[in-house]
Amino acid sequence: MSVMTSTLALQANRNTATSRPAAAAATAPAQRRVDSRLLLRESRELVIEHLGQEYRLRRTRNDKLILTK
């Protein structure tokens, strides 16, 4: 999966989440929020295993995050 595909998938998920009716949003549980510094600690890259697949979360020199497969 390319960076562009990952980015588009994340944007699609965000758009779906914000297009819910107000009543459904009011009853939905709060999303978990994790600070990226806790995940990455002192490293610039983290390997995430999901359903047997490996994904890499990388912090760039410009402090942007990139998720790749």
Image: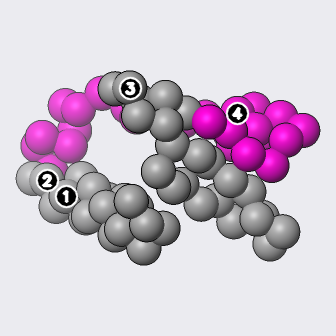
Asked which secondary structure carries label 2, the reply is: loop
Which quadrant: the N terminus? bottom left
Mark in front: 2 vs 3: 3
Tell me which numbered mark, 3 or 4, is placed earlier along the sequence: 4
- Mark 3 Cα within 10 Å, few/some/many (few <14, many 20+)? few
Numbered range of the magenta stretch = 22-47
In the rendered view, would you say 25 is above or below 38?
Answer: below
Q: Secondary structure at mark 3?
A: loop
Say which element carries label 4.
Answer: helix
- Residue 28 x, y percent position in the rendering: 23, 32
Say which residue appears at 69% left-offset and 65% top-offset. 64
Q: Quadrant of residue 7?
A: bottom left
Secondary structure at badge 1 equals helix
48 horizontally vs 23: left or right: right
* Foreground: disc 3 or disc 4: 3
Q: Mark 3, mark 1: which one is toward the viewer?
A: 3
Residue for badge 2: 20
As measured in the structure, the alpha-carbon distance from the residue carrying label 3 to the one carrying label 1 is 26 Å
Q: Which residue is mark 3?
A: 52
Residue 41: % across, % down: 83, 34
Q: Residue at x 47, y 51 (%)?
A: 69
- The residue under label 4 is 39
Marks 3 and 1, the one that precedes in the sequence: 1
Measured in 3D between alpha carbons, the distance from the residue under mark 3 to the one under mark 4, in whole angstroms, is: 20 Å
Which residue does the numbered mark 1 point to in the structure image? Answer: 16
> Which of disc 4 and disc 1 is earlier in sequence?
1
